[in-house]
Image (cartoon, rainbow, N blue to C red):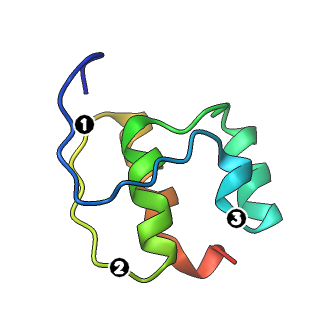
């Protein structure tokens, strides 16, 4: 997503750091090991609803980092 782009959502909660997402320690270490310091805009809005069992449809730019981000979002068994 381009900086300043529009994000449409029916989810109001935005989490601006991985530590606040209550992820399992191994997953959190892996995220930081890949060099991610701050969640992307889509991660800030999509991870928590996934953790809470909500149905989520999310779209982001394509690319290597986005594939990794989708894997993080779509790994509910790794989330506490």
Identified at 64% across, 73% down, the residue is 79
Residue 46: x, y in percent? Answer: 39, 57
Residue 22: x, y in percent? Answer: 71, 64
Identified at 47% across, 47% down, the residue is 14
Q: Which of the 4 quarters of the picture holds residue 50? A: bottom left
The residue pinned by badge 2 equals 54
Please indicate whether residue 61 sits to the left or right of residue 68 in the image. Answer: left
* CA separation in Å, label 1 and label 3: 24 Å
Q: Which type of secondary structure does the marked residue at label 1 adopt?
A: loop
The residue pinned by badge 3 equals 23
* CA separation in Å, label 2 and label 1: 23 Å
Q: Which type of secondary structure does the marked residue at label 3 adopt?
A: loop
From the viewer's perspective, is the residue at label 2 or at label 1 nearer? 2
Please indicate whether residue 55 sits to the left or right of residue 52 in the image. Answer: left
CB within 8 Å, label 3 to label 2: no
| Residue 24, above or below 36 | below
Q: What label does residue 78 carry, if any? A: none
Please indicate whether residue 66 sits to the left or right of residue 27 in the image. Answer: left
From the viewer's perspective, is the residue at label 1 or at label 3 nearer? 3
Residue 63: x, y in percent? Answer: 31, 33
| Residue 24, above or below 72 | below
Q: What label does residue 62 carry, if any? A: 1
Q: Which type of secondary structure does the marked residue at label 2 adopt?
A: loop
* CA separation in Å, label 3 and label 2: 16 Å
Which quadrant is the N terminus positioned in?
top left
Residue 53: x, y in percent? Answer: 42, 83
Identified at 28% across, 69% down, the residue is 56
Earlier sequence position, callout 1 versus callout 3: 3
From the viewer's perspective, is the residue at label 3 or at label 2 nearer? 2
Earlier sequence position, callout 2 versus callout 1: 2
């Amino acid at each position: 997503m381009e900086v300043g782009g529009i994000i449409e959502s029916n989810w109001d909660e935005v989490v601006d750091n991985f530590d606040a997402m209550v992820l399992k320690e191994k997953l959190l270490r892996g995220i930081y090991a890949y060099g991610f310091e701050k969640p992307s805009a889509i991660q800030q809005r999509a991870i928590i609803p996934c953790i809470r069992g909500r149905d989520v449809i999310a779209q982001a730019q394509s690319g290597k980092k986005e594939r990794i981000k989708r894997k993080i979002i779509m790994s509910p068994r790794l989330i506490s």
